[in-house]
Structures are given as C-alpha cells and as structure tokens.
Image: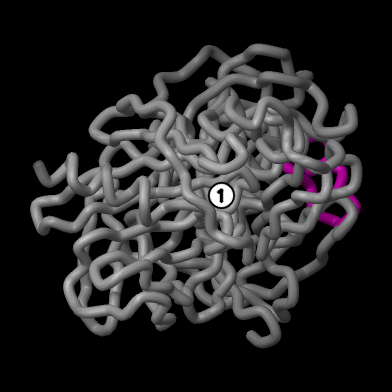
Amino acid sequence: MMRLRTGFCAVIALCGLGFLAAGQTPAMARQIDKYKVNAWNVSVYEDDDTGDFSHCVAYAEYKSGIVLNFVLNSKYNWGLLLFDVPGRFSKDDRFEVKYMVDRGVVRAAQAKAINGKAIYVPLPDNVALFREMRAGVRLHIDVRNRISTFRLDGTSDMLAALADCVRKRRGAPASADATPREDDAPPREGAPKNARQDKPGASSPRGTSTGSGFFVTADGVALTNAHVVEGCTEATISGYGKAKIVTRDQTNDLALLKIIDAGKTTPAKFRSQPLQLGESIFVMGFPLAGQLDNGLNFTGGIVSSLAGPGNDSRRLQFTAPIQPGNSGGPIVDESGLVIGVTQAKVNEMAALRASGTFPQNVNFGIKSDLATSFIRANAVEPILGEKGQPQPAVTVARDGRDYNVQIKCQPGGS
C-alpha cells in the first residue's frame, strides 16, 4: 500500500516539475508509462493540459519509510524528490539541504517543500556529481540537521535509463543552447560542437587539486597533465613530499614535476613501436580522492581510435573507464609500456543534450610520442622499450605501483 500511495502522490506533487527547476507555472501531470530498472520504479509523465512530455522519475522506498525519487525533466534539469521525510514543513518553504555521496564533496542546495512531508532538492548541472551518483554506494542527505542515508544500488543503470527515457520522449536532441555547466572542465579546442570533454582531475572539499602522474627518470622527475597543476606554484607527490613544477605545456596539456628532496625512483618505459587500433590497454591512476581507497586504481580496455576529437592525431581514444583524479596517469600496453597519458573523457550529459545519445567510456589520452617529445624538449631523456610478450594484468598492475604517483596541489598557493 505504501508504494501505491506514494506513486499516487507523485502524480500530484510532481505536476509541472519544470516550475521547480526553471521557474515555470505548474500544471497537472499524469502518468503515461511505467517500468522497472533493477530495484527502481521508473514512471513517465506528461502535461495534463497540453499532452507534452513533462518528466521521467525513478523512485525506490527505503526501510526508513522515505521514498527517494530521481527526477529528470524535458529540459534535462534534474533533482531529488523525497517523500515522508522526517520533520515538519509548510508548503513552499525554502531551506538549505546538504548532501554527500560516500565520503566525497559536501554540497548544498536550496530545497523547496512541496507539502508537509515532501521536499524537492534541485541538483546542479554538474557532470562530476552525475558520475558520483552513478558510481556511489551511499547518499547522505542532511535536512534540518536530520541525516538520512540511502544506498545507491543500481543507480548506474537507473540514471542511464532515466536519461534515455527523456531522450526518447523528447523525440529529438536538445537544443544547442542547452549546454551544461562544468565546474572544472572548459571545452577544449577541436572538441565536437556542444559536446564537452571533462578533464578528470579532482578537487577535495578544501580546494586541493588532485591527479595522477608517473616517474620518467630515476631521480624524481614525473610527468602529468598541465591542468592537474593549473594555478599551483608547487605540488606534493604522495609518499615523496614536495615537488617543483619544472615546466608546463598548456597547449598539449603536459607538465613535468621534480621531487625537491629527490631520492631514487623507478621510471616508466615508453613504447617505441606505433600504436595499433583495437589493442588491449590498461589505465592506472588515483581517481576520486577521498571516496575510494588511496591505492592505485587499475582498469582495462582497448584502443578504440587512433585520433582524438576533431581528428586530432596527437591523441587516442580508449574504452578503459576513468574518473576524476585519473588525469596525468599512464596508459600502458599489455607488456607494461607507456603508450599514452590519460587526459579527458566525453561529458555524458553534454553529449546527451547535444546529440540525444548517452556515450559511455569515450575517453581520450595524449599519445606517447608527443609526451616523449615534450620530455626531450626539457632536457630529459625518456626511457624507451620494445614491445614484448603480453604480461598478466596482475603483473602489469604490480609493476605499475613502482612508478605511479598521486599528485596534489593547492591552486593559488603552494
């Protein structure tokens, strides 16, 4: 009975959801379709007056009695709707709500009370948050100093399905002016129109920029992306201490760092042979600082294109999953030789709005020949190697621990 009652309430309380996110006048909405995605119930609504598509909702009821709804409307505005929230509210009350995925960034939003037991929390047009919701384990929401925790089981498939629901009901791609905002990833030159690339660096709640890198010499010189250390005068390499930023190439998004109190380090080897389309690769790095463990993260995929956006021959495209914080880490072949440097991934929400499609694992790296040219141009000789027999993934990962590093810096300071 609880589910049926809540579903009925959704028809009334979610009417004209656009007014909550976009300042429109509310109108009655009616349910026109429903289905399940894992444990989530998905419902589709249209404007009762005009018959136009309104929004898609995915909801689940928890043991606490709270019903958590993820809502995506026809303009791709999204938010959370919570039914049976502890506390008392008056219709149209506005107040601050704080929320956090796992142990990540604490965010705040201005919530609105729909009635005495339901509130709507608008979510920012931020791809990093969208990814956190898909990959996270728990969502913590603080409503007037009462914290509720929700498991995010199945949200990866559910949010993809929710985006697909809106795309299909709209019947056409979103307009070109519906470009999402991305806090830390401006469009790069040569990117497809209206489809941004995210540079997967990460920021902690204190504003510390984090990324990945790897040693290229035995005396403490490391390579990373320029955007990882953007705005910083020096950096810290975890486990090794302070590092000087030797040089950066903003055009090609590369930077060299050197440990100030350098000891002996293990350098990575770059492959001397050309890259092949379709070959297996591995990506290493330290993504989602503060949310995952602090150990090396290791994922696999293939080389899916020998050029980047705009047919940029300096870059490659690969399928191995990456997350914020992977920037600057090595892309290696099956023998453990570096064939590229992780740089960017397609902004899924931007691509969804621009083309009506939801891309997955469309990621880009800087080819190793450009990286080695950059290293040589700064009077450092990279170590090259010939491609050998494929090694077990566990061996490649074990060897990678010796030369992969996490990089941290404070933009605007040391």
Question: Label 1: how many residues lie within 10 Å, few (<14), some (14-19) or many (20+)?
Answer: many
Give 358 or 284, whichever is nearer the viewer: 358
Q: List the residue tagged with mark 1.
A: 326
Give 367 or 287, whichever is nearer the viewer: 287
Q: Magenta residues?
A: 368-382
Magenta-drawn stretch contains 230 = no
Residue 28 in picture, x, y percent from top left = 47, 49
Q: Considering only vertical position in the picture, is 181 above or below 116?
A: above
Give 395 or 154, whichever is nearer the viewer: 154
Task: Name the main secondary structure of what is drawn in magenta.
Answer: helix
Quarter placement of the N terminus: top left
Give the residue at x 28% y 36%. 40
Relative horizontal placement of residue 4, taking residue 63 as reference (left or right):
right
Give the residue at x 27% y 44%. 8
Q: Considering only vertical position in the picture, is 341 above or below 32?
A: below
Relative horizontal placement of residue 372, taking residue 283 as reference (left or right):
right
